[in-house]
Amino acid sequence: VQLQAFGGGLVQAGGSLRLSCAASGRTFSSYNIGWFRQAPGKEREFVSGIGWTGGTFYTDSVKGRFTISKDNAKNTVDLQMNSLKSEDTAVYYCAADESSYYFTRDMRKYASWGQGTQVTVSS
């Protein structure tokens, strides 16, 4: 499956952005989808994910601020990001895990990756 992430941009602290991950080639209704991010000089980290059953997962630093959702009809997964902080600045990637039954935050399980979209939060 090919993924494309878009929706990033520049926003002031406290603002909101909505990222979208669109799939082509195959429907990802049966995949686990994750959002990951990588800030300059740091390792890529898990942000949020949605399992093929609809369960949602968040890293602690974004709980209560970010919301992930999936639209199987449109083959998209969105990440609504509210109350953004400067530490949210990073390149955000969506990825698909096509093989795991249970949701995992281990990025090594994700075989398909989008190209990344830059999110910059100014303080």
Image (cartoon, helix red, strand yellow):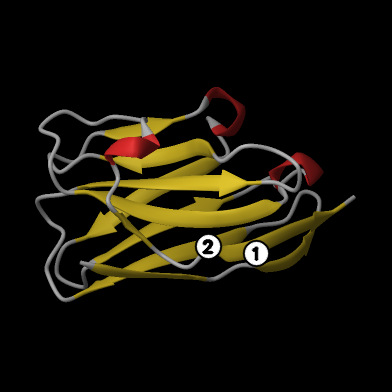
Given the image, on which type of amino acid does mark 2 rest? Answer: Arg
Return the residue at label 2: 18
Q: How far is mark 1 from mark 2, CA to CA?
A: 12 Å
**Label 1: element kind:** strand
10 Å crowding of disc 1: few (<14), some (14-19), many (20+): some
Instruction: Identify the residue at horizontal 12%, vertical 42% (top origin).
Output: 99
Quarter where residue 88 is shown: top right
Residue 25 x, y percent position in the rendering: 16, 76
Between 5 and 107, the one nearer to me in the picture: 107
**Label 2: element kind:** strand
Q: Is 6 displayed left or right of 118 in the figure?
A: left
Contact? badges 1 and 2 (CB < 8 Å): no
Quarter where residue 45 is shown: top right
Instruction: Identify the residue at horizontal 55%, vertical 55% (top origin).
Output: 92
Return the residue at label 1: 118
10 Å crowding of disc 2: few (<14), some (14-19), many (20+): some
Instruction: Identify the residue at horizontal 81%, vertical 50% (top origin).
Output: 13
Between 72 and 33, the one nearer to me in the picture: 33
Residue 21 x, y percent position in the rendering: 38, 65
Instruction: Identify the residue at horizontal 70%, vertical 38% (top origin).
Output: 42
Residue 122 x, y percent position in the rendering: 86, 56
Q: Given the current orientation, which residue lies at the most extreme right position?
A: 123
Vertical placement of residue 57 versus 18, above or below? above
Please identify the quadrant where the N terminus is shown.
Answer: bottom left
